[in-house]
Amino acid sequence: MIKRILVGLGGTPFTPTAIRYAVELAKVQQAELLGLTVIDRRRLGALTKSSGNAQSAVREAKRLDEIVAKQELSIIDFGSACTNAGLHYDVIRESGDPFEKMISQARYYDLMIFGLRSLFDYDLVGGEASDVLTRLVSRGVRPILAVSQEYRPIRRVLLAYSGSMESAKAIRRFMQMQLWPELSIKVVTFEHPPEVASELVAEISSYCQAYGYEAEVEHIEGSAKQLLLQHATDWNADLIVIGNSIKHYWLKKLLGETAMHVIRESRIPLFLSQ
């Protein structure tokens, strides 16, 4: 059960889907919603100055106006959706470093909902989406529901289990939150010897059973990085639950190489935890 949901209103193509999921979950969970927008005016100013001419400065100023306009439209859509659903909500317009503002607001929220590959509609952050989400997770912003651009009802959930403690934590967090009332669940492992895989999936499926789910299980001998997304697509998964599965340096050490690859390539929504 959750009571507070934070949703990013970045004005991107992913924002309408983020709003829809947020409202859907808030209705089921009887949770309150906070919509958050962030504009880093200082960095926009720096980009304008670095352009070196008045024409570029005008373009950047126009770009800022467009960003603000998109975010304001997102706020209107968010407010209308919440009001129509009879939900309690609030909106905060922040100015400053996007990461610090999002981290600060996320402290007392149970779930954060952002776009899978677009948290912001401007290049104020740099790097790939996987780096963005990893930085957020590293600062305690979790769990995150990273949504795809196209909305899909969550009915079939694939639990990617590596056998690591972090992977188990992600699955436990998802099961304990009970976000959606009726689900078909499948547990899949990769790369382990058959006898190890059998034990792993038996443990997790038993845990799922305690929550009332008869999980389908499967072990795949190949690489999770290479095969997880294809398997999720073939199984018609609506959501992939994934945690840290492999220890790597710096960015990779927090989500794991497989999770980083999935974030970059997935068209299926992800539940990210640690």
Image (tube, rainbow, N blue to C red):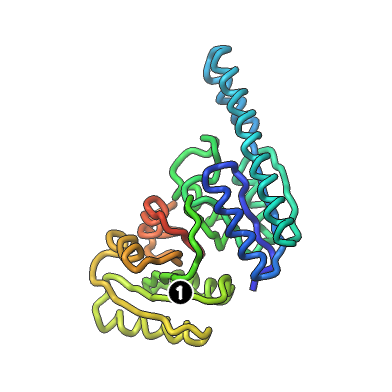
Q: Is residue 12 above or below residue 196?
A: above
Residue beneath disc 1: 168
Query: Could one spot residue 16 in this view of the protein?
Result: yes
Label 1 element class: helix
Query: Could one spot residue 134 in this view of the protein?
Result: no
Q: Residue 144, position in %: x, y?
A: 55, 59
Q: Residue 58, position in %: x, y?
A: 60, 17
Which residue is rendered at x = 36% and y = 54% of the image? 261
In this view of the protein, which residue sits in the foreground, 223 or 17?
17
Most extreme residue toward the front is 84
Q: Is residue 173 above or below residue 208?
A: above
> Residue 238 appears in which quarter of the rendering?
bottom left
Q: Is residue 156 above or below residue 213?
A: above
Amino acid under label 1? Answer: Ala
Q: Residue 68, position in %: x, y?
A: 65, 34
Q: Residue 100, position in %: x, y?
A: 63, 46
- Left or right position of 30 against 49: right
Which residue is rendered at x = 76% and y = 60% of the image? 88
> Residue 157 appears in which quarter of the rendering?
bottom left
In this view of the protein, which residue sits in the foreground, 237 or 91?
237
In this view of the protein, which residue sits in the foreground, 184 or 174?
184
> Residue 242 appears in which quarter of the rendering?
bottom left
Which residue is rendered at x = 37% and y = 71% of the image? 162
- Left or right position of 138 against 235: right
